[in-house]
Amino acid sequence: MALAPEEIERYARHLVLREVGGPGQGRLKAARVLVIGAGGLGAPLIQYLAAAGIGTLGVVDDDIVSLSNLQRQVIHGTPDLGRPKVESAAEAVARLNPHVRFVAHPERITAETAADLAGQYDVVADGSDNFATRYAVSDACFHAKRPLVTAALGQFDGSLTTIRAHEAGPDGRPNPTYRCLFPNPPPPGSVPPCAEAGVLGALAGVMGSLMAMEVIRAVAGFGEPLVGRLLMVDARSMRFETLHYAWDEANPLSGTAA
């Protein structure tokens, strides 16, 4: 897509990158990206996607801004208390980049709505905080044949991977699904929610920014995505490690018995 003169100046640092350039920035402008959640992960993710020039940015969230959010959900501010997060995020995006079209989805993701929404976008980024949503979104992306960037936060740790389960790898084997990585959710009550366990605010910024990197990579087409690799971040020791995982023929989506 052609860039206006103001956009050429705005994205000048992208345009001089050989791996992005004009064609890559054009792909960013043409892209439609869906972000699940405008919270700890979604806040920095939305900001960097808007700054990068994603043409259409859809955000799904049914929550309102509360005071305890502001320690990490940096897209919202004190004046936004009590407002729907999608409204606060929409205003922040408009201030940051008027060339981005913001689409608010003030609803909670279910298996049915995930299936409908995934097909409307080119890439999905899941920053939700529960396994039910993660499974619903990952299944929907598989059926809609959409790339999925998904991340999770702990107290001082985070993880990130990219799922392209609708495609095959260089060896011809299917790429792994989210269910290949996590066949079953953890037992109820074994993973305490953020409100009980706590979370380091700046860690959400790190992981959300890494999510934005993977989304931009998926759209612009540079480098090697985290397909079949789980990036794990330990903020206590500032250690980054990568776990490799592969297609499981027993998975219910693309396995031999699917």
Image (spheres, rainbow, N blue to C red):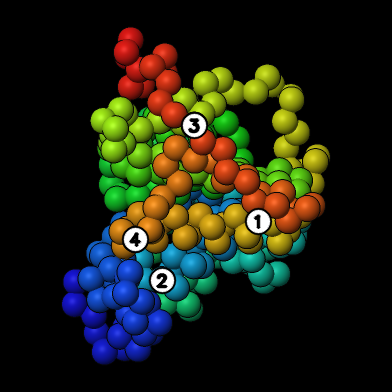
Of the numbered discs 3 and 1, the one sitting upstream in the chain is 1
- Compute the Cα span from label 1 to label 4: 24 Å
Label of residue 222 in the image: 4
**Residue 155 visible, this angle:** yes
Query: Where residue 189 sits in the image (x, y, percent)?
Result: 74, 24
Q: At numbered mark 2, what does the secondary structure look like: helix, strand or loop?
A: helix
Of the numbered discs 3 and 4, the one sitting upstream in the chain is 4
The amino acid at mark 2 is: Ala
Query: Where residue 255 sits in the image (x, y, percent)?
Result: 35, 17
Q: Nearer the viewer, residue 135 or 215?
A: 215
Residue under label 2: 52
Task: Sort mark 4 into few (<14), some (14-19) or many (20+) by Cα contacts within 10 Å.
Answer: some
Residue under label 1: 204
Task: Name above or below for residue 207 compared with residue 26.
Answer: above
The amino acid at mark 1 is: Ala
Residue under label 3: 245
Q: In front of the other: label 3 or label 2?
A: 3
Of the numbered discs 1 and 4, the one sitting upstream in the chain is 1
- Compute the Cα span from label 3 to label 1: 24 Å
Query: Where residue 123 sits in the image (x, y, percent)?
Result: 35, 50
